[in-house]
Image (tube, helix red, strand yellow):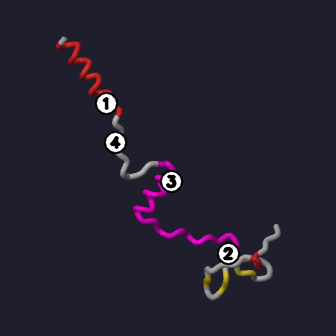
Amino acid sequence: MSTNANDFISVNRINQRLTPFNTGKVQIGLLYQPPPPEMTSSEEIIQAALLGTGSIHRSPAAWPVILGSTILAILLITLMG
């Protein structure tokens, strides 16, 4: 497996060494990825909306109300008429 650790430029410094650190035999931290920053609640809502996975502020579905009121109206019309 050939890697180009010398071509990799990173702004992450650990103990005054650039990541990945090449010891001559092994490359330490070549696959290291720093953890992502914590997301705020508004960022989570935006990400959920963009991914289509839903959001916290989803309004309830209107079809159960419409269906229930239609059935009630039909029952009232048949019982009164």
Q: Which residues are magenta?
A: 30-53
Amino acid, disc 3: Leu
Which of discs 2 and 1 lies nearer the camera? The answer is 1
Disc 2 from disc 3: Cα separation: 32 Å
Q: Earlier in the sequence, mark 2 or mark 3?
A: 2
Left or right: residue 80 versus residue 33 is: left
Disc 2 from disc 1: Cα separation: 59 Å
For label 1, the SS is helix
* Residue named by callout 2: 29
* Residue named by callout 3: 50
* Residue named by callout 1: 66
Q: Are marks 4 and 2 in contact (CB under 8 Å)?
A: no
Amino acid, disc 2: Gly
Q: Position of residue 44 (x, y in %)?
A: 45, 59
Which label number is shown at residue 60? Answer: 4
Disc 1 from disc 3: Cα separation: 29 Å
Disc 3 from disc 4: Cα separation: 20 Å
Q: Which of the image's four quarters has the C terminus?
A: top left
